[in-house]
Amino acid sequence: MQNKHTQKNCKLSIIIPVYNEEANLLLLYDQLVAVIKRLDISTEMLFINDGSRDASLEKIVQLSKQDERIKYINFSRNFGHQIALTAGFDHVIGERIVVIDADMQDPPSLIYDLYKKMDEGFEVVYAKRKKRLGESRFRLWITGLFYRMLAKISTIQIPLDTGDYRIVSRKIVDLLHQMPEQSKYYRGQIAWLGFRQTYVEFERQERNAGESGYSYINLIKLALNGITGFTDFPLRIVSISGFFVSGVAFIVLFYALITRLISDKIIIEGWASTIVSVLFIGGIQLIGIGIIGEYISRINQNTRTRPLYIIEDSNINHGAAIRK
């Protein structure tokens, strides 16, 4: 049993979002304890139960009764991974903060290297993947394509081949509190802040047990948050497409008029060309409306006054129960 810590002497906070990870929690805890012992600093472990349907909460509560360093927050429902991170940032008290998932793909032992690297004067040290084991080629290809595309079109440099696994300073967390957007994308937000940032490389392992909570639909939502939050490039594409379609229509009209004047015969005729033209222009319009709609949806979300999350239960006696 550990002594209680205060905000003044807590050197490290570890945020662990949890969604249906009951099979991994004991192993994760053992490895976190090992790395904390190696660091030999006062530490808290904050588990965020994001609406798990298995026995994850029961295991976390049991662990918290055995170890006072363990804190937990239980959401009233599933609010999503990025919102779970928000709750973690809102309630941690350490001077430095680590974010790590509970699926055991990111090795807890790397926390030691991340912490020591920060001693060199960095505000952010993120874990960069050299390899990603246990993932399909299609998933690797589509995620790699997205991150490289975002790096090309974004106004900021978001690190490639990284996730949310990283260590940040208290300064970074305090600045994140000043970024109130509802659609969170912390990889981009932390990169946007600037300061001295670096990385430590590692090989990402296969899941120890269970299934990934990030389906392709969730990945698409995260990608849309990243794109709409950090670049206006899609809107420019809509404008350029509009000019392009208008130019093509003008050229076809000019060709039809010249043909009519020269031969007194309309060469462009038939339903096929009409249908193709209508479908092409209609497709461009629908894509444009969809892109604009994503940005409007983001604005709509940011104007709502709903809390980002609701806490059903917690053993933390500091901080607010809801986050707006």
Image (cartoon, helix red, strand yellow):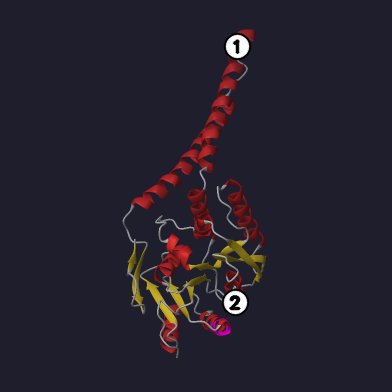
Q: Indicate whether 84 appears above or below 145.
A: below
Q: Residue 202's spot in the image, x, y percent?
A: 66, 70
In the picture of the structure, the residue carrying the numbered disc 1 is: 260
Q: What secondary structure is the stretch in magenta mostly built from?
A: helix
Residue 140 lies left or right of residue 323; in this view the side is: right
* Secondary structure under the numbered disc 2 in the rendered image: helix
Residue drawn at x 33%, y 53% is 304
Residue 239: image tag? none
Foreground of the two, 92 or 48: 92
| Res. 137 image quadrant | bottom right
In the image, is residue 35 part of the stretch drawn in magenta? Answer: yes
Q: Is residue 224 visible?
A: yes
Q: Amino acid at mark 1?
A: Arg
Q: The N terminus lies in which quarter of the figure?
A: bottom left
Q: Is residue 81 visible?
A: no
Residue drawn at x 62%, y 58% is 160
Q: Residue 85's spot in the image, x, y percent?
A: 46, 66
Q: Indicate whether 252 appears above or below 19.
A: above
Q: Amino acid at mark 2?
A: Tyr
Residue 178 lies left or right of residue 248; in this view the side is: left
Residue 129 lies left or right of residue 10; in this view the side is: right
Q: Residue 33's spot in the image, x, y percent?
A: 54, 84
Residue farthest bottom in this picture: 1
In the picture of the structure, the residue carrying the numbered disc 2 is: 112
Q: Indicate whether 91 appears above or below 154.
A: below
Q: Which residues are magenta?
A: 33-38
* Secondary structure under the numbered disc 1 in the rendered image: helix
Residue drawn at x 60%, y 11% is 260
Sooner in the amino-acid sequence: mark 2 or mark 1:
2
Residue drawn at x 47%, y 68% is 170
In the image, is residue 232 part of the stretch drawn in magenta? Answer: no
Q: The C terminus lies in which quarter of the figure?
A: bottom left
